[in-house]
Structures are given as structure tokens and as C-alpha cells.
Image (cartoon, grey):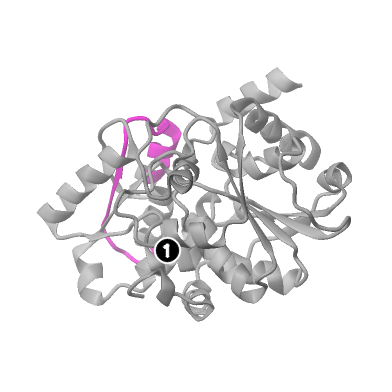
Amino acid sequence: MDDYNSLSLADIYRARKIISPVITRTPLVFSPRLSMLTGFKVYLKLETLQLTGTFKARGAANKLMSLGNAEKERGVIAFSTGNHGRAVAHIARNLKLPAVICLSERVPAFRVKAMRDLGAEVVAYGQSQDEAYAKALEIQKERGLTMIAPFDDPFVLCGQGTMAIEIFEEIPNTKALIVPLSGGGLFSGVALASKTINPKVKMIGVSMEVAPAMIRSLTAGKPIEIPEVDSLADALLGGIGLDNQYTFSLTQKYIDKSVLVSEDQIARAMYGAFYHERLVIEGSGAVGLAALENDLIDLNIEPNDPVVVIVSGGNVDTRLLQAIIEKNH
């Protein structure tokens, strides 16, 4: 795994074998509402039902379970906007490894509490994921810990890509996948698997308007920094790293379209999923639904073709969800 070109579907199948003892095969459910709205057969890949409530457990498990004994004994450190840290904390606890999670001070309190409840040492520092990353590097050097990156790591992205295998096993003729896009670990892993299985499948990346780090980097043709601002899709916040080695190039290679959704569109998608499907979805997990609901994607496929939306997580502050429901009801 020297560079992104060396990664293959075989690595993702290897990841599936490694993580299968601890990872849930999440359901792929048909959405009558979105199918009627779009004219396609829309299915939802519910990573909301994954361990710790998001897809992040897949990548964290593959990385942690692939470490050598010496690395495990020293312990691990991660930087995160919340969900990756929670996944690392959970898997590390199961493996009886000490874990430190560095977060920016912008990360919501309910996410911080979840990591502490799992036994991780949580360090809050700075106003962005990049600043938390700098702190994590400092602690890593001081203590000799192993870094568990949230996205730009071949073991992590291959772990995330295992869900694509599940999707094509159930719906082999899937014509398009709509995937939340941030640092690119989820998108690049799923795209690598999907495009290898079927090179004609369309890969759509969706992010929020206010801080789409990967999409702006793709436009610039290189990784760039952008300011972090508050968003309902807080788990999609953070830069992609100016020294990005894997996910930028893989996303650039495989993405067919990118879409931006507004905060209001995200909120309405969260409400629609709760009201119609009785699904609790966090903002970052709702961006694909928002893109479909607002007819923002020209898929250029046939009516009734199967389309899969990855619903990446369900870790939402219940007070926030209640406020969104009350506003939209």
C-alpha cells in the first residue's frame, strides 16, 4: 500500500475478512417515498445501524486490528470531528488498547461525552480539525503512540469500502451511489470497490455548502485549506490535509459528480427521514437524501434503475433533532 495506485479490490476483501467478527452488515432498505419522488428505485444503506452509529467503525476496526503487537502495546491516538474518535475509542476498548482522541473545541459536547464514556482520553484543542491534528502529532511524538487517521489511510479507506461489497452483493445492477463527501475516506473506499466491480456505476459525492473542503480542493486541483464554520453536517467538517496521500487522488479519479446542499435542505432531509421513514439521521448522513429531495443530481440513468444512498450516521443531538422536527412539522 505504498500509494493510492497500489490499492485494489483485493485489499477491501481482505479488510472485510479482518473486520467481520466485529462489524455489522447493515441493512439496505427500499425507500418508496424517494423512489416515487425521483422515478428511480432508491435504496438506503443504513450505516446508522453500524457500531457506534456510523460507518467509521469499519475503517477504525481494519486499522486497529491490523496493527502489530508492539504498536498495540504503546497505544493509539486519533484526531476527529467526533464519529471517527468514537469508533476508535470503541474498537480500542474491545482490543484493550489505550486510546487518546484529539478534538477541536468546536466538536459538540454529546460527541465528546460518548468518547469519554468508552474509556478514551479526550483532548480538546483549537478551533478546527487541523489544529486538533497538530495537537495529536505533538502528543503522538511525546508518548510514542500510533496515529489512527480519520480518512487518509489505506487501511481506513479499505475498511469503509467494505460496504460497497455488501451493496453489490444485494443489488448487483446498482447504477449510482450517492455518498457523503468530506475527507474522502468513505467516498474513496466505496468508489474504489464500486468502480472495480462495475466501472460504469456513477459515483456522486455530496457535501454541505458552508465548508466543502474536498470539493473545493477538487476544483483547485490540489488539497487546500478552508475555514471551518458551524454546520448541521458537523461530522463532515475539517480539512483534507495539505499532505493528503490517498483520498484526494482516489476521489479525483473516481468521482462523476459533486453536489452541495444548504443547511436548510439538510434540516428538511433530517425531518423527512424521521417523519416518513422513522429514521434518526445526523446532518452528515442526510446530505445524500437532501440532494435527491431537491433534484440536485442529473444521474442520466433510466427510470426504475437502482440508486443507493449511503446514510452514513445517526449520531445526532436529540435536542437538535427535536428543534428541527418542531420547526418543519
Q: Nearer the viewer, residue 155 or 318?
A: 155
The spot of residue 25 in percent (x, y) is 62, 66
Left-right relation of 189 to 286: left
Name the residue at 70% across, 60% down. 27
The answer to which of 265 and 283 lies nearer the viewer is: 265
Q: Which residues are magenta?
A: 94-115
Which residue does the numbered mark 1 point to in the structure image?
Answer: 156
How many numbered circles does the render carry? 1
**Which amino acid type is shown beneath numbered disc 1?**
Val
Spot occupied by residue 280 in the image (x, y as percentages of width and height): 65, 40
Viewer-proximal residue among 257 and 329: 257
The answer to whether residue 114 shows anywhere in this view is yes
On the question of residue 24 being in view, the answer is no
Q: Based on the displayed image, in which of its 4 quarters is residue 283 positioned?
A: top right
| Residue closer to the observer: 315 or 300 | 300
Does 49 appear above or below 189?
above
